[in-house]
Image (spheres, grey):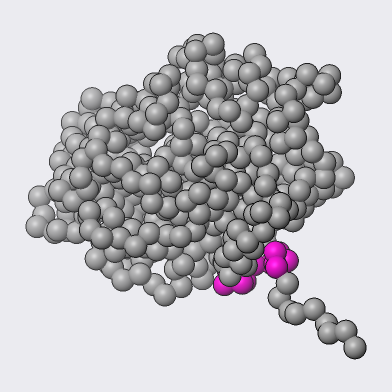
Amino acid sequence: MAALLAARPLAAAQRPNTRPNILLILSDDHSRPFVGCYGNPTIRTPNLDRFAGEGMRFDRAFTAAPQCVPSRAALMSGRSPVAVRMGRFNSPLPPEVVTLPEHLRAQGYFTGICRRNFHLDGPGPGRLTPEVQEIYDKHKLMTFDRRVDYLDRNSGPNQTVAKVTEFFDRVPKEKPFFLWLNFNDPHHVWDKLGTHDPAKIYLPPTLPDLPGVRGDLARYYDEVARMDGEFQSVVDLLKARGTADNTIVVFMGDNGYAFPHGKGSLYDLGLNVPLIVRWPGTVRNGSATSELISGEDIAPTLLEAAGAAVPKEMSGRSFLKLLRGESHQGRRYIFGQRLHHGSSIFDENTKASGFDLSRCVRSQRHKLIYNCTPHMVYQPVDSANDPGWREMVEAHKAGRLAPVFDRSYFTHPRPVVELYDLEKDPAELHNLAGRPEHAALEHELKLALQEKMILDYDFLPLPLPITPPPRRP
């Protein structure tokens, strides 16, 4: 690694170009509470904590979907996953959807993607059945070889420094760069690294205090800590190359953690992710904001930072003024879309973890979730066979699970509408939908969601009537 870090400095550092380089780093399945700088007293993330002291921490940043594929589609397109037709997991991004790196490339940037599978070209080479591969080949559906200058489809974690170095070595001296770097951690399956003591970790109020739950969560903590070290290796490489002072570094989670109430759900632990931006000379060190930020907002913000116009089709809103410390008109709402997950076909055994269709709207204080497949039996995405969920199921069957968790995870069918006061109930465990005293609020949020669904040409039925009821004679 020392040899790689000492490699020749990137010539771009010596050019007079004032346009910033852009480095977008995504951790995988990473909810906001699991970084020390967000108030977690037990997780070990010294590098990210220090990085937050050098930039701006976003406390209310939300991905557009609680799953890897649709979330990344929004990050790259500046639009919702529904609007760009990414409703089926492992679908390739439609060729006509122009992405952030393509827009930057047209502005003279050298662009690249590396490390973990970036999820927008389908499952990737060698992971399709022969029949489906033939369809992909016939219609040229794998498009990212043509969209960026440098593409590393799926290298291992031990290749991070080597691949980033390879990218830097290819950047022409007269060009700024954009690199989208994807990490594996802390995606399930979680390794037992022994970094955190299960008895001492912070346990979210959405999870019962059971040995299996603590054991699973400690392994998750361990992977976050490992990712923190991988992150620092990239920051060190950037510094060694002499480009840190002219580079916007964005660190973000792609969606929430794979526990109940997390990944695959529209609760905050599924959508609210860490987002930290460092931009020397522009972003104030150690600053923080509680403004609502959507995953749709990343692309337009980075385009504006690069001096490019934001395309009309992008529904995301730039927060460049917020980064600069200027007056910024924040969002009133953010929206989330839960779509198909995984690669399995639909059959009688399909659970909500694989096929669950829902939408949400969130304001600073309230959230409304609209469930369109309430009869699907709930289980967490990815971790249903781990000790934590198995112990929760056993406790439920034995009548030993606290009523709040029984109601949240084992109600069947699930409610079509959920409404939460996030100030009084930040864990989203007490559904207020249907109560007369909240009728006006529920209608307001449904109307906001209705507008978003109409503008996105959403395929789901709307939460409010679209035509007036027929008149009686």
Residue 245 x, y percent position in the rendering: 16, 44
In the picture as drawn, the residue positioned furthest to the right comes out as 473
Q: Which residues are magenta?
A: 453-464
Rendering coords of residue 23 (x, y %): 31, 47
Q: Nearer the viewer, residue 84 or 359?
A: 359
Residue 234, x across and y down, in percent: 30, 35
The structure residue drawn at horizontal position 28% and vertical position 68%, both measured from the top left corner, is 308
**Relative to residue 463, is residue 210 depicted above or below?**
above
Magenta: main secondary structure: loop
**Which quadrant, please, contains the C terminus?**
bottom right
Is residue 100 rendered to the left or right of residue 11? Answer: right
Q: Is residue 142 at all visible to an observer of this figure?
A: no
Q: Quadrant of residue 391?
A: top right
| Residue closest to the far bottom | 473
**Residue 107 x/y as whole percent:** 27, 67
Q: What residue do we see at 55% from left, 27% from top? A: 204
Residue at (61% x, 72% y) in the render? 454
Residue 287 to residue 226: above or below: below
Q: Is residue 173 visible?
A: yes
Q: Along the horizontal axis of the image, is 252 left or right of 282?
A: right
Image quadrant in which the N terminus is located:
top left
